[in-house]
Image (tube, grey):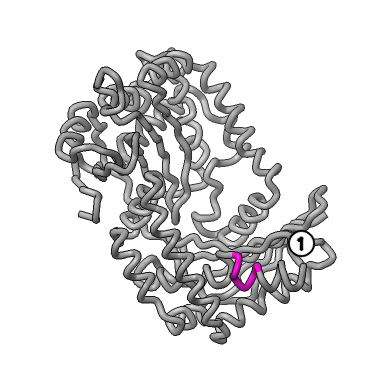
């Protein structure tokens, strides 16, 4: 049991996490279905949930689904695809009103769970496959989603850096798949793929709200019948990589502002050292007092933005900056200088303690957002390190500057990606 979360295995490969709390006026239900990230599987895995959301056997179109949700006091249902470590995760989120705030005290949670069950497991079928018109329309939507990355140049630069950096690893796969694979999906084959996926994907189901754990577990077990099947074997992510000469990739588009992204290997697996690594990222580029913001953006005026972020499960750090194309070398040099200063222990007390305050504040604010609560437990569980909020705060309080410098000396630059005009 993680603090505030009660975990139960309710079926083979199915874990239920319940967080009884009076902090929220809604009840959040999130489902996560896991598989290994693979280039050949990414596209159909991204497509079939979009088709599921179009209609179920007893809710055959979006209008019927919307009416049903509106009848549940404006309940909301959504889906997305996540990439964590080297997993592609299909997720659905249902949010319903807390029943004590509804006039007739109807069984809003039960009815919401029944809608979620029907969307997940009772799809609308036609001639031995998904409804052809729905598949055709969602294929076009998925193409737009994949192409949409082009319009967000900052995200595009980060994604392209990751793809080049991890070109021989699963993590280089784009979570929404690939344009050339979308048209190949046919209604019958996609249905077969979906059925195999939902029977084999390990599933985590989270419930957060003012609920009683035993009652919710009984309700979930009553509403859902999870398909049996031999579950996927999920391998741990490949984290360690020997340092070599950085790979430099330059690409050109019709843009005004250059996008410089640097991909680093930390060689730090998700474990005890994850907290010093979070400090490292915070000091380098996670806050307005951080080295990148102060030295690259403010003092040198070389970047419109400059920050770093971690992919903790994979052990990667990415530095993103928007620069004038002519300032490429200056910006690159000063960014690398900040990373070198971290390894040399050039970290001021001001930088360190302000980072601690910022991280403690972030960890505390997680308590006020049910989605972030779930995300933290999901990430910890995926890495066999589920930690309570109390334990997270304690670990952050215990990090020293020596811990950060020790890890900083193992961080090395892998890929330099520059998107320019």
Query: In this view of the protein, can residue 272 be seen by the observer?
Result: yes
Measured from the top left, where is residue 255 in percent x and y? 80, 50
Asked if residue 289 is among those painted magenta in the image, a careful observer would answer yes
Q: Is residue 411 above or below residue 254?
A: below
Q: Nearer the viewer, residue 209 or 176?
A: 209
Say which quarter of the image contains residue 17: top left
Marks counted in the figure total 1
Q: Quadrant of the N terminus?
A: bottom left
Please state if 134 lies on the left or on the right of 262 as rendered: left
Graded by Cα atoms within 10 Å as few (under 14), some (14 to 19) or many (20 or more), the crowding at tag 1 reads many
Please state if 153 lies on the left or on the right of 222 as rendered: right
Q: Quadrant of the C terminus?
A: bottom right
Magenta part of the chain:
288-293
Say which quarter of the image contains residue 116: top left
Q: Nearer the viewer, residue 301 or 322?
A: 301
Q: Residue at x 64, y 70 (%)?
A: 292
Q: Is residue 95 above or below residue 305?
A: above
Q: Is residue 321 above or below residue 336?
A: above
Q: Nearer the viewer, residue 50 or 128?
A: 50
Query: In this view of the protein, can residue 125 be seen by the observer?
Result: no
Measured from the top left, where is residue 357 in percent x and y? 46, 68
SS at badge 1: strand
Asked if residue 323 is among those painted magenta in the image, a careful observer would answer no
Measured from the top left, where is residue 112 in percent x and y? 32, 25
| Residue denoted by label 1 | 323
Measured from the top left, where is residue 2 in percent x and y? 24, 55
Q: Residue at x 39, y 73 (%)?
A: 273
Q: Residue at x 50, y 42 (%)?
A: 42
Q: Residue at x 25, y 32 (%)?
A: 226
Please state if 320 lies on the left or on the right of 250 as rendered: left
């Amino acid at each position: 049991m993680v603090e505030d979360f009660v975990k139960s295995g309710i079926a083979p490969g199915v874990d239920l996490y319940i967080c009884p709390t009076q902090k929220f006026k809604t009840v959040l239900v999130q489902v996560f279905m896991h598989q290994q990230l693979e280039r050949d599987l990414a596209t159909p895995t991204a497509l079939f949930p979009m088709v599921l959301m179009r209609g179920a056997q007893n809710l055959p179109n979006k209008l019927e689904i919307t009416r049903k949700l509106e009848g549940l006091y404006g309940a909301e249902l959504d889906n997305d695809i996540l990439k964590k470590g080297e997993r592609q995760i299909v997720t659905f989120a249902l949010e319903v009103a807390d029943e004590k705030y509804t006039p007739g005290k109807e069984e809003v949670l039960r009815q919401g769970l029944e809608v979620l069950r029907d969307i997940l497991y009772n799809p609308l079928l036609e001639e031995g496959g998904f409804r052809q018109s729905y598949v055709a329309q969602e294929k076009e939507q998925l193409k737009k989603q994949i192409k949409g990355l082009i319009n967000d140049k900052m995200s595009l630069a980060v994604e392209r850096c990751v793809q080049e950096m991890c070109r021989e690893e699963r993590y280089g796969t784009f979570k929404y798949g690939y344009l050339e694979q979308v048209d190949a999906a046919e209604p019958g084959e996609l249905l077969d793929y979906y059925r195999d996926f939902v029977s084999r994907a390990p599933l985590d189901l989270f419930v957060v709200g003012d609920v009683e754990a035993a009652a919710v577990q009984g309700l979930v077990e009553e509403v859902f019948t999870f398909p049996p099947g031999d579950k996927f074997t999920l391998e741990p992510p490949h984290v360690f990589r020997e340092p070599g000469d950085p790979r430099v990739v330059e690409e050109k588009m019709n843009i005004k502002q250059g996008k410089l992204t640097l991909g680093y290997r930390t060689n730090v697996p998700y474990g005890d050292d994850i907290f010093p690594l979070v400090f490292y990222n915070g000091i380098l580029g996670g806050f307005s007092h951080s080295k990148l913001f102060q030295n690259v953006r403010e003092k040198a005026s070389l970047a419109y933005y400059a920050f770093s972020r971690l992919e903790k499960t994979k052990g990667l750090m990415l530095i993103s900056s928007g620069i004038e194309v002519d300032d490429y070398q200056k910006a690159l040099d000063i960014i690398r200088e900040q990373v070198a200063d971290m390894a040399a222990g050039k970290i001021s007390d001001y930088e360190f303690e302000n980072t601690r305050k910022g991280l403690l504040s972030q960890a505390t604010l997680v308590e006020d957002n049910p989605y972030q609560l779930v995300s933290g437990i999901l990430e910890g569980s995926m890495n066999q390190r589920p930690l309570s909020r109390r334990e997270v705060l304690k670990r952050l309080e215990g990090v020293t500057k020596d811990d950060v410098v020790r890890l900083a000396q193992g961080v090395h630059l892998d890929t330099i990606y520059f998107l320019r005009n």
